[in-house]
Amino acid sequence: METMKTDIANLQDIKTLVDHFYTKIRENELLGPIFNGVIGDNWAAHLTKMYGFWQTLLLDTPAYSGSPFLKHAKLPIAKEHFDRWMELFNETVDEHFSGAKADEAKWRAARMSEMFQYKLDYFKNNPAEPLV
């Protein structure tokens, strides 16, 4: 018998989403080497940042500030990486949650992915250092 899924409603739900998602990322043969290579032994700190990031976006709680793009600007990533990231993210949301916030999480992740890809493509074709 399948357990009834609830919507993303609080910090514990954010932690469930982030922890399960990044477990998949770490184990993924395409994404794992990139994330593990950059984050190294600092996964606890990264996960804490991600809790704050998603808490800010989904729960309107000011728990994160900063510009995430710059940390990704020089990574060796392309469309295939974003596609796999989105696949794992949506899969994780769907495994654990159902509702308006779950849908919003997937929508926000898709917009972020598109924005990052656009910016990365721009900076690859324009060699100046990003200002923002």
Image: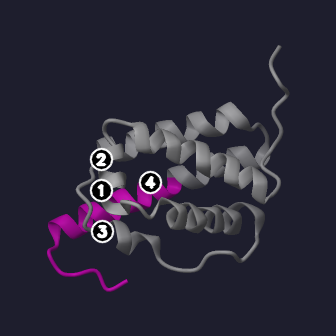
Q: Local crowd at mark 4 within 10 Å, few (<14), some, or many (≥20)? A: some
Residue on which disc 1 sits: 37
Region in magenta? 111-132
Mark 4 against mark 2, which lies toward the viewer? 2
Residue placed most toward the observer, 39 or 110: 39
Residue placed most toward the observer, 119 or 10: 10
Mark 4 or mark 1, earlier in chain: 1
In the rendered image, the vertical position of residue 45 relative to residue 35, given as above or below: below
Separation (CA) of disc 4 from disc 1: 20 Å
Instruction: State the SS at label 1.
Output: helix
Mark drawn on residue 120: none
Q: Residue at x 29, y 47 (%)?
A: 33
Look at label 3 and name its amino acid: Ala
Residues at badges 1 and 2 in contact (C-beta under 8 Å)? yes
Look at label 1 and name its amino acid: Gly
Mark 4 or mark 3, earlier in chain: 3
Mark 4 or mark 2, earlier in chain: 2
